[in-house]
Every structure is written in C-alpha cells, then in structure tokens.
Image (cartoon, rainbow, N blue to C red):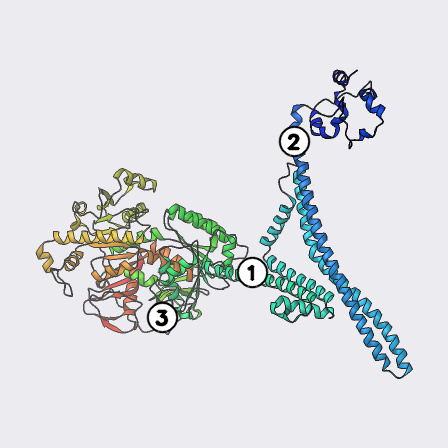
Amino acid sequence: MSLDSETSTAATSGRDWFFPSPSFFRSSSSQYGRRFYSNPKPSSSHPISNRPPAASASGIRHRRRVKFARNPTPAPTPAPTQELPQISDAKNASKNNLSFLSQFRCHLALATLTIAALLLLLLRNMHLQSQVKKLQGEILNLNLRLRAFHELDSMNITSSTLLDDHFSSENLRRNLSLFFSFTLLFIPIFIFKYIDYVSKSRFSENISEQVSLNKQIAYRVDVFLSVHPYAKPLVLLVATLLLILLGGLALFGVTTEDLAHCLWLSWTYVADSGNHASSQGSGPRLVAVSISFGGMLIFAMMLGLVSDAISEKFDSLRKGKSEVVEQNHTLILGWSDKLGSLLNQLAIANESLGGGTVVVMAERDKEEMELDIAKMEFDFKGTSVICRTGSPLILADLKKVSVSKARAIIVLAEDGNADQSDARALRTVLSLTGVKERLRGHIVVELSDLDNEVLVKLVGGDLVETVVAHDVIGRLMIQCARQPGLAQIWEDILGFENCEFYIKRWPQLDGMQFEDVLISFPAAIPCGIKAATYGGKIILNPDDSYVLQEGDEVLVIAEDDDTYAPASLPMVWKGSLPKDFVYPKSPERILFCGWRRDMEDMIMVLDASLAHGSELWMFNDVPEKEREKKLTEGSLDINRLENISLVNREGNAVIRRHLESLPLESFDSILILADESVEDSAIQADSRSLATLLLIRDIQARRLPYEAMASQAHGGSFSKGSWIGEMKQASDKSVIISEILDPRTKNLLSMSKISDYVLSNELVSMALAMVAEDRQINDVLEELFAEEGNEMHIRQADLYLREGEELSFYEIMLRARQRREIVIGYRSVNAERAVINPPAKTERRKWSLKDVFVVITEKE
C-alpha cells in the first residue's frame, strides 16, 4: 500500500485532522520533505548515509507505518456566527490588557532601575562612612598613644568602643533616613501608575463603565480645591512641609550634620535657591539642587496664588461684591432718574450732622454707578455715597449692604411699565420683610400706580411708607394750574434747602391752646398737632380751642430741627377782617396736552374742584375710542361727571398746524403733560414739552391784538418786539404748567419766564428724602395731596388787611385764623419768590393789596 493511498484513505475516514495543514508542509518542506521521497538522493551530510547498505538498498520496504486510532475524537463544532462579535471584543480586551500589562512592566522596570541606582548610592555612602570611621579610628589610636596613664588609656579604650557603636548606629540611621526619603518620593508615582492601570483595566473589562478611577479622583480633588476657599493655600503648605521634610532626611543621609540642622538647611534651600552653592560633595549637591528646584516650583505657585488672591480682591472691590459695614445709614435700592435729586436732598439733610452715609445697591456695574454719581453737579456736603452691585430680591445681597442696620430704606420705582415696576417693588418689600434680623429703620416705597398701594402696605405692614409719585404729581399740576406760583412754594417746603416740616414734643406747651401755640415760635410756624390721645394721629390745622395734652407733639415749618424753640407769648393785636370775601366759582376752560397714565384721576380731581359748566379739552395723539376705553378701564364713568364736560381733539402737540386748530387764546389754564409714550426718557419728554410750550406761546402772541400787547408790556430786559417779550405778554392771558423731568431743563424755563413748571422727578425725590428722614411727615403730605382735608392755597392780601394798613406777620396769622387758615408765608408784588416762615414776625410793615399770602386751609 502506497503512501498516497494511505493518505487518501485517512482523508476519507475522517483522520485528516491528525496531519498538519498544507501550509505547514509548504513552510517546512526543507526540513521534513526528505522523509517522503521514494528514491532519496545519497548525500554524505544526510543522516541516512550512515545507515547500513541493506537498509539503504531496500528503500521503501523498511518505511515505518503510522497506526491511527480506531475511534478518533470527533472534531469540535464551530461556534455560531452570532457569537463572533463577543469573541472579537474579548480578543480586543485581552490585547488591551496585554498592552496595559506591558506598560506597567515597563514602569516597574524603570522603578526597579531607579531603586537599584538608589541602592548603589547607598552602598557608596556606606563605603564613604566606613572610610570616615576608619580615619577616625586611626586618629583615636594616635591620641591613645599620647596618653601616659593607664587609667586614662583604659578609659579611652572604652570610649573608642562606645564611639564605634555610636558610629555604626549613626550610619544606620543616616542610611535609613536616605532610603525613607527616596521611598516617600517614589510612593506617589507608584500609586498614580497603579490607579491608572486599574482604571484602564476596569474600563477594558466592563464596557458600561464610563468614568475611570483616575477621573473620579481628579474630580474629587477639583471639587475640594474649588469648594473650600483655603484649599489651595493648605495644599501648598503641605507640599512645602513635605519638601522640607524629605529634603532634610535626604541631607541627613548624605552629610554628617544632625537632623535638626539638615531640616534647617532644607528650608533655606527651599526659600532661596542660591543657598546650595556652598554644598560639598556630589551627594549633598545633588540633594541640594533637587530641593532648590522644588523650592522654585513652590514659590512660583505661591506667587501665583498671592497674585490671584490680590486680583480677586481688587475685582471684588471694583465690582462691588464686598460687604458694607455701616450703621444708621440710608439704603437706596434701585436706580432711576430721580437718584441724583434724591442724593442731593439727603446730602443737604445730613449737612447739619457733618455728613452721613448713603448706600446705593442696584443691578448695575459699580464702576458705571460711581461714574454717573461723579458727574452730578452738586456738593455732597460731607456725605459719602457707597455703591454696590446686587439684587434687592436676594437676601444675601441685602445682607451685604447691612440692611438690618439701616435707619431708612428707599425703594425706587423702575422706569418703564407701571405695573411691572410696582410688582418688583412688592417683591422687594417681601424680601426685606424676610430678613431674619429685624429691620432697624422703615421702608419708603415709591409706587407708580395708586391702585397698588393697598397691596404693598398689606405686605409691609407698619414698616412701609408709600409715595405714589405719578398721582401726586398729577394732582400737584392741577393745583399749580389753578394757582400760579404754587410749584415754587412746594419746592421750598419739600426740599431741605429752605424750610420743611418737623415734629417735636415741647412739654412747656402742655395745657396751652393752639391759638397761643401759633405765636409761640419766633423761628417756626406751627401747622398741626400730633395728638397722643388719638393714637399719634397728626391733626393738620386744628381748632383754636384745642388744648395740648401730655405727650402731644407740635408740627411746625422751620429751617432746621435745631433752629427753633418756643418763647414767651408776645402782645399781638388780633383785629378783624376787612370783610368776609366769598369768591364765587366761575366756569373755566382747561387744556391737557398729552396723555398720562392717571388721566382718570386728574379728571375726577378737576370735576370736584371746578365750577359747573367748565370744559376740559384733551389734545393728544390717542384715538378717541381708545381714550374712552382707557378711562373706563380706570374706573371713570364719563356720564357721571357733574361739573366738567370733555372735549376731545386728536393731533400731535409738536406740530404747529395741529395746535393752530385749537382756540389757544381762550383757555384759562394749559397743562403740558409728559406724554406716556416718552416718559421713560427724561430728555426726550422735556424736549417735547419745550417744543409744545414755545409753539403755544408763539400762537397766543400772534393772536393777541397789538393794542393789548402794547398796553400789557412790562418793563425789564425784554423789549416789546422780542419774541420772548411777546410770549411773556401772552403768558399774562393764560397760565401754562409744564411737567419737567430733568432738572437741567428748569434753568431754561426760569430764565425765559414764559411758563410755570412742575419739576416732577425732583419733587418726588424731595418727598422720598423727607419721608426717609422722618416717616411721620408722610401723613402730612398725603393729606395735602389728597382729595379731602387740607391743602395749600395762595390768597390775595385784601382778604386779611386794608390798603396802607401796617400789620405784623403775627397779626396777619391771627386774622387768618378767623377764616380757619394758617398763614405760612407771603410773596410781595414785585418779588419773584415767596418767603416761607419769614423772620421778625413781630415787626410791623406796610402791605400792598397786590401781595399774596400762602396758607394751609381746608379744601373748598
């Protein structure tokens, strides 16, 4: 049977897996192919040449047979095709493990070489120590020979033995310290490498593992350094101490100095890298250079930390993030156009105290706020203004400005939508009432809509005083339109520059009637009583028969709270009134130019104060149907108006041809309102008001007849032919009140004298400052601006005196009490401004019937 047949038979019987694959035969034919040749070639180098001739001649007859097993093991069934991806993933994982294992082995080999180098260094150190000990022993033997006495000799021998033991133990300690220092130096490296190896192994074994161990440790370290404020300096301190300790131990191992001195040397190398220049020997120099490199790194990090800390501190100061440590200061929350006037009034109020502190917190950049305040053209009179960036809705920001220690907190209304501004003011009041520490001062809230006042007072309780700016200005404009010159008087009373309201108790006045109290203050004018029996209610303009009780306080108008005091009663002749004048009301025609949010409130005030048959003309660019809708939504029923009738005209108040369609020469009063569409911008609103004023005055001057203009010409700097002179003559025919928002516009109007004005923003700021200084004054202002109660009026002099009569101011005050009025000042016929709380009240003088007096009286 031939080999080919045996091979084919084995292939058919399933025994072909016993033989190598064909590729194996091809790759190894040079080694094993000669065994299967039928006629091998004789060769001297081949082992078959050593066989006997018979064997070589027989050839194939002596070939060895291979016997196979009868029951061979069946071949394994190949795995299904769906398991192939898992097998490939396992192979990849095993490959990754092998690569990680090889990297770890490389690191381990590197560490082993490093430790071997250290051991060589230790052996060299030990050799040097032995040489030193040998030299020291020789020196000791020479010293022993010089000893003459046996006792000393024996003692020296004992000392040498002890010295040898000491040297051996010292050498051991130094070697251990050197080995310990290098071990501590390399332990973190091994730990980090092991963590990296473990994290990579876990990631390769578990595909679902998304965060490795080294990333978790890095995250924890990051959290620790970012959360704790002193983490970075603490880590730097620990690193410095470790460097000093390791360096000291290393120096102790390579030098002959003691451990304390080595630690000190290590610190000097860390602190100053130039101190290692005096080191001797390769070992000490190597250690000293290593310590110096570590010291340079640590001091570079320390310099970076110090620089970052200083930068952060300056940034915090620049951005207004630092805490305000103040007491009894005035806190202003918010930013608006009224802030300049408010700061001016607070500075004037604090002047008598040598100055105060005002803290402003708003959601603006601190540098921008300080720059805007620096541009304000007034003297702060010793008052310091501190700005901080923050939100009044955040308690942390409120604590940053010492809100609980402030004597007054002013919440300014934002420019823009009234409802949104009042809603923000409400949230601010909620934040203030949520402060854990009780507030020392009261809260003054500026509101834009009267309807929201009840809700704010409900939330704030007794802590809150509200000033509804928009409604107050609207009513004040109506009063000034019907009584020219009243705006200037309100500026004098509300501002701190002249006279203002004060409330104080005077026990020496108890039991005295109010009629006598009126003439008891030479430097003040009493206006009311804060009655203790009525729960502290302020009674403005009380009866003459009211007797002051114990605990009552007197409301006066004075220049300052320390400039007045009661004196003895003067002798005053009361006299009698010339006659009881009752001025009958006559119908009036009033024009409104522009549209305000509180138009319905102004209409209701006019309807209550004007005579029957009066007309109110409304000229603006709001469509008539939309006007009726807005008035109805403001709870105004036009059909229920009793004394006035509405006349609607649509047009633009800054276009001349639109204004010429109106009978401008026939109106008794004209009110130029800051239009709702431009009230957010003070400059734009004032520009519109000025343009309307000039157009109206020019149209009036052209429509007046020449004879009337010539007969009404006044003397002064204006000639009859000049345009300002013509407008001034036209102003005598009708009163125009302009609502001014920017204080800088006031100078233009005061110089031209062609119109009266109401500086709305400044008046509101004055009221806020006054209520912030004394919250009791808010009750007085509310009554003076309310629809009922007392108000301020300008009266003609013929109501109280006769022509050429000489009277003192006290005598006029007592005569005015017969009409239930309190005279607080006067304005002479040739004077431009009124005098409030005049001095020398007992001095007699001649009065003119054209003079006017300012009084507080009940509303008509």
Judge whether 858 appears above or below 199 on screen: below
Q: Position of residue 811 (x, y in %)?
A: 28, 69
Looking at the image, the residue that sits furthest to the bottom is 148
Residue at the (57%, 62%) spot, across then down: 300
> What is the x, y in percent for residue 139?
81, 76
- SS state under label 1: helix
Q: Nearer the viewer, mark 2 or mark 1?
A: 2
Indicate whether 30 appears above or below 629.
Answer: above
In the rendering, which numbered label is found on residue 521?
A: 3
From the image, tell me which residue sits under label 2.
Answer: 88
Q: Residue at x 71, y 53 (%)?
A: 113
Q: Residue at x 79, y 64 (%)?
A: 172
Q: Does label 2 or label 3 sit earlier along the sequence?
A: 2
In the rendered structure, the answer to whether residue 229 lies left or right of residue 128 reads left
Q: Does the image show residue 711? A: yes
**Residue for badge 1:** 305
Tag 3 secondary structure: loop
